[in-house]
Amino acid sequence: MQREMSAMTPAFRVQDRANRGAQPFDLRKQPRLGESLIQGFLAVCGAITVLTTLGILYVLGREAWLFFRRPEVDLLAFATRIKWQPAIGEFGIWPLVIATLLTSTMAMLVALPIGLMIAIYLSEYASPRVRGILKPILEVLAGVPTVVYGYFALTWMTPLLRRIFGENTVDIYNTGSAGIVIGILILPLITSMAEDALRAVPQSLRAAAYGLGATRLETAARIVLPAALSGIAAALIVAVSRAVGETMVVAIAAGAGPRNFNSWGEAWGGMALLNPFKAAETMTGHIVRISGGDLSYDSIDYASLFAVGLVLFLMTLGLNILSRFLVQRFREVYD
């Protein structure tokens, strides 16, 4: 009898209890106060995040609109010129944008191959003991204050570059040393996200590759790496966003003034615009330098900071949207 009762389906049990005159089971959803409170708290946290982002966009947009409404500001010149000197009415944003992209590119050239190789080693080769040693070391790198990285770039990386390439070639303040150190700074981010993407690949794919005679390197390069492409692409975009928004390293080591040119022809002549060994000022570095001075609220320098901040916000927003697109485009779903 006990075996027959255990074989009954839930619907049959309810009907059987009703036929015997017993109180049927109540299968409706029961209220749970604790779960409802947690759900409400999480919803409030999500709403606060959205409202904070909208508030930041509103403040930047309002102040930037006031900046562009000034008679001495030309929106076309802002978007096309390559000379940024607000004190004399020159508002070409490109020197700051290109310096930001230059340092970010240098950072990715350092961080992406090294971080990806470390992630492959931790995911495919390292033993649990070795992984337990290396992971905390990477986490320590992630926890070092960025101002320490800035002085490391100025006092160690710059002298090293000057010894290698010559003191007449490398300036004391240069985007090259700042970009290399930013690459070291974002290395734990790329490594951690890429390793998570690699470890999420089902073990059955590895076993199938081994069964067909593939080596561990062939399995990692031809099976696991393509299968984790969406996660690796997301790690790349997030790391670029982190590099674009880095402040203290570029403020200390890259330079304290924009690399201005009178024309695009002059900028591209001899590739002076993209020389990583010369001083330049990024968008975040410019915001730090200008906002640290004694500026009045109505001054043109103060108003220009919000325009620069809005451009920086739109750049990071575009990178995040691109990250979402890449994740959806290359995402692999396994049963």
Image (spheres, helix red, strand yellow):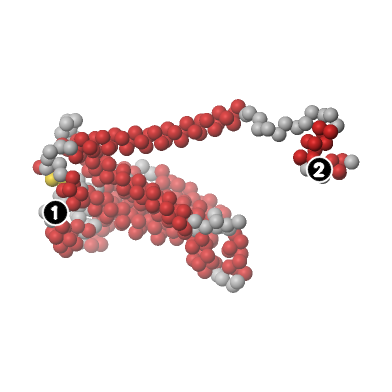
Name the residue carrying label 2: 8
Please state which of residues 182 and 84 is positioned toward the viewer in this rendering: 84
Where residue 261 is drawn, which disc sits there? 1
**Is the residue under label 1 in contact with that under label 2 (CB below 8 Å)?**
no
Q: Amino acid at mark 2?
A: Met
Is 328 rendered above or below residue 313? below
Q: Position of residue 191 (x, y in %)?
A: 45, 54
Label 1: element kind:
loop
Q: Which residue sits at x=79%, y=40%? A: 12
As helix, strand or loop, the secondary structure at mark 2 comes to loop
Per the model, the C-alpha gap separating discs 2 and 1 is: 83 Å
* Residue in view at x 68 percent, y 32 percent: 28
Instruction: State the image quarter where residue 145 is shown.
Output: top left
Residue at 44% over, 33% down: 47
Looking at the image, residue 56 sits to the left or right of residue 198; the answer is left
Which one is closest to the eye, mark 2 or mark 1?
2
> Which quadrant is home to the C terminus?
bottom right
Residue 328 can be seen, yes or no: yes
Task: Count numbered badges in the picture.
Answer: 2
Q: Residues within 10 Å of mark 2 (few under 14, many from 20)?
A: few
Measured as percent of width and height from the top left, residue 213 is found at: 59, 72
Quarter holding the N terminus? top right
- Of residues 169 and 35, which is closer to you in this image? 35
- Give coordinates of residue 231: x percent, y percent: 47, 54
